[in-house]
Amino acid sequence: MGGPQGRYAKAQEVQFLHPPPFICMVIYKMGSAKNLIVKPIRATDANRIIRTLHYSGKTAPNSQVHLGVFMNGKCGGAIQFGPPLVKKNILPLVEGTSWNELFELNRMAFADWLPRNGESRCLGYAMRWLKKTYPNLKWIISFADGTQCGDGAIYRASGFVLTDIRKNTALFRNKKTGEQRHLMQFFHTGTRFEIKKGLWEPLKGYQFRYIYFLDPSAKAKLTVPIIPFSRIDELGVGMYKGQSKKGAGSVESDAFAHQAKEGGAIPTPALQSKSQSKK
């Protein structure tokens, strides 16, 4: 897989997100995940890609690192990282973590025409790039959205560990407009009273917290249990492409309820586009 070439990809390369159907077919059949290139792109380009491909149409305000995913010279995806909005409740997840030793994977979105099975390859490269570029980083945290996308299959295929499964209490939908909002946004805008008035309802489903250790030694300092991946199916809370795999079971956990306190961005529906979810 190709690495960064210069500080940013050239602006003219970040332009062709949705090829015509025939070109999509050719790329899909002839393209290989081995031919994907991941390299830094400008924030403005990454945000445009996320707004175009991500189901929410929204970017994460705390994103600081922006990687583009390229095939045949055209950018068809983006991966964004940044510090959690509020670190004080996330730092204790790994004992001894300093404020500058973790990032959150904020957003990932891939176009449908990119090769299959390329997501975990790109994510793996992104992790290696982070480790080389930011040697101070010890681990990465991310959240999979089991209310609208998936349960984190790409994370599981990319070496993350599962550390929490929780019934959603952080994502809400406006009953009238259909707008979706994270609980933290109500705090930031001073509109939490709208929830109490019954104008918003929590989305049905579950949230999943994953951690990736850039520094393997940090894994021994994890202060919460690692949950076997099989637990997702045992509880009947799996989701794929926005559809529940089974009828939802019940989960009693106290780790994800405080996601808003943890300061995580809106849970990342990993590698989801408006028309496609890979989880």
Image (cartoon, grey):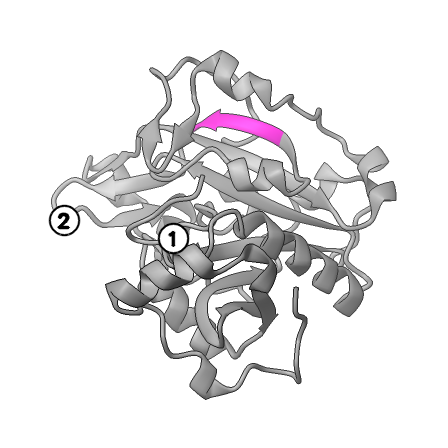
| Residue 110 left/right relative to 69 | left
Q: Which mark is residue 177?
A: 2
In three-dimensional space, the C-alpha distance between marks 2 and 1, rounded to whole angstroms, equals 17 Å
Task: Please name the residue shown 41% across and 13% down the image.
Answer: 249
Quarter of the rendering occupied by the N terminus: bottom right
Q: What's the magenta bit mostly, secondary-structure-wise?
A: strand
Image x and y of residue 233, in percent:
49, 17
For residue 174, what is the image quadrant? top left
| Residue 50 left/right relative to 65 | left
Q: Secondary structure under badge 2?
A: loop
Task: Please name the residue shown 31% across and 69% down the image.
Answer: 19
Whether residue 258 is visible to the viewer of this picture, yes or no, is: no
Whether residue 71 is visible to the viewer of this picture, yes or no, is: yes
Residue range in magenta is 163-168
Task: Please name the residue shown 42% across and 70% down the image.
Answer: 47
Q: Amino acid at mark 1?
A: Gln
Task: Please name the residue shown 69% across and 56% down the image.
Answer: 127
Up/down of 74 relative to 78, above or below? below
Which one is closest to the eye, mark 2 or mark 1? 2
Dot 2 or dot 1, earlier in sequence: 2
Q: Amino acid at mark 2?
A: Thr
